[in-house]
Image (spheres, helix red, strand yellow):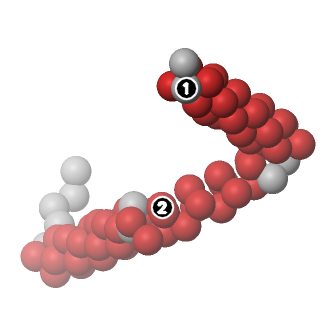
């Protein structure tokens, strides 16, 4: 194995440092709270505006209404 001189080692260390910095920056961008919140909001909106999502919302609204009516009837007795 050929021996490396100090300059080659420094260059390799600088390259590794630059690659590590780029990786850390990419992770920071991926895990940014504002970005994650925006993605979650977009995903939820897409799911809720789909036909299946609208059916779930309608069913949930109906169930809540029925429970509220039942509770009102029970409280008047």
Residue 67 can be seen in this image: no
Q: Mark 1 = which residue? A: 76
Determine the residue positioned at 48% across, 61% down: 36
Q: Secondary structure at mark 2?
A: helix
Residue nearer the viewer, 44 or 65? 65
Query: Would you say 19 lies left or right of 12 here?
Result: right
Tally of numbered tags? 2
Label located before the other in sequence (1 or 2): 2
Q: Secondary structure at mark 1?
A: loop
Quadrant location of residue 33? bottom left
**Mark 2 Cα shell of 10 Å, populated few (<14), some (14-19), many (≥20):** few
Could you say which disc has been placed on residue 36 in the image? 2
**Mark 1 Cα shell of 10 Å, populated few (<14), some (14-19), many (≥20):** few
x and y, in percent, of residue 21 in the image = 29, 73
Where is 5 relative to 62, above or below?
below
Q: Are marks 1 and 2 in contact (CB under 8 Å)?
A: no
**Residue extending furthest left?**
6
Where is 66 relative to 52, above or below?
above
Query: Would you say 28 lies left or right of 69 here?
Result: left
Determine the residue positioned at 75% across, 33% down: 62
Residue 33 can be seen in this image: yes
Query: Would you say 54 lies left or right of 27 here?
Result: right
Q: Name the image quarter holding the C terminus.
A: top right
Where is 42 relative to 77, above or below?
below
Where is 62 relative to 75, above or below?
below
x and y, in percent, of residue 48 in the image = 74, 49
**Which one is in front in this view, the residue at disc 1 or the one at disc 2?**
1
Residue nearer the viewer, 54 or 36? 54
x and y, in percent, of residue 28 in the image = 35, 67
x and y, in percent, of residue 44 in the image = 65, 52
Could you say which disc has been placed on residue 60 in the image? none
């Amino acid at each position: 194995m050929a021996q490396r001189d100090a300059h080659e080692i420094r260059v390799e260390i600088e390259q590794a440092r630059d690659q590590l910095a780029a990786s850390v920056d990419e992770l920071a961008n991926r895990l940014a709270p504002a970005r994650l919140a925006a993605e979650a909001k977009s995903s939820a909106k897409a799911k809720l505006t789909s036909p299946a999502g609208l059916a779930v919302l309608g069913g949930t609204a109906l169930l809540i209404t029925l429970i509220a009516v039942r509770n009102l009837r029970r409280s008047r007795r």
